[in-house]
Amino acid sequence: MGRTVQEVNLTQEQAADWWEVEALFDLCFAPGREALSSYRLRDGVAPVSQLCLLARENGILAGAIRVWPVRVAGRPVALIGPVAVHPTHQGEGLGGMLIREVIDRAHHIGWERLMLVGDAPYYGRFGFTRLDGVEMPPPTNPDRVLGVGDWNGISGQVLRVAGASTPPSHQGLKLS
């Protein structure tokens, strides 16, 4: 019988975990993932530490999710992603558990709007819907721009937060 998500321990990512998480993302995503438009919004920006989570089984990284602050129409928005599950754990519900936990924690700490770029059929089960009028940097497919939370009357370009530094965010990263 396969493993269950109950056997997995969720913790907040720490600075020492950065490269291990990056290795998981490299394993799970195509080469060149950092060329995606969402990475331009993350460069030099510290992630929302309380929402960057790791899933470990017996101390071994099984999944990870990161969340970044962005702005739309002058309002703060939490941009979810990347989220990845190690191939040996795919199909166990771990990705769903990470998404649900981020939504719950984000709501608890005051984030009113969350968004991501992804497949509507998958993320729709967590309450995400297409964000008409919210524009990610090109070449993002508008059908994949999804959000959950209070998006009433909010539209415009997704912008990098002000004051972001130019070095990569893992340099001097303070997640805790």
Image (cartoon, grey):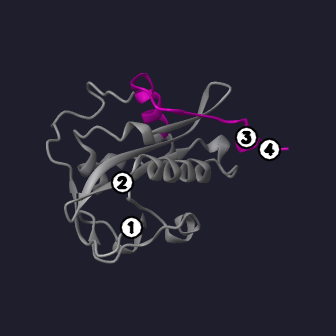
Q: How many marks?
A: 4
Looking at marks 2 and 4 on the same chain, the residue that comes earlier in the sequence is marked by: 4
Q: Which residue is mark 2?
A: 79
Cα distance in 3D space between marks 2 and 3: 26 Å
Q: Position of residue 7 (x, y in %)?
A: 73, 36
Is disc 4 surrounded by few (<14), some (14 to 19) or many (20+) residues within 10 Å? few
Is disc 3 surrounded by few (<14), some (14 to 19) or many (20+) residues within 10 Å? few
Looking at marks 4 and 1 on the same chain, the residue that comes earlier in the sequence is marked by: 4
Q: Position of residue 1 (x, y in %)?
A: 85, 44
Locate residue 165 relative to residue 39 in the image: left or right.
left
Question: Vertical placement of 125 versus 70: above or below?
Answer: below
Residue 71 or residue 26, whichever sits in front = 71
The quarter of the image holding the C terminus is top left
Q: Which residue is mark 3?
A: 6
Residue 146 or residue 21, whichever sits in front = 146
SS for callout 3: helix
Q: Which residue is mark 1?
A: 150
Residue at the spot 49% in from the left edge and 47% down from the top edge: 105
- Tell me the quarter of the picture where residue 52 sits: top left
Q: Viewer-nearest of labels 4 and 1?
A: 1
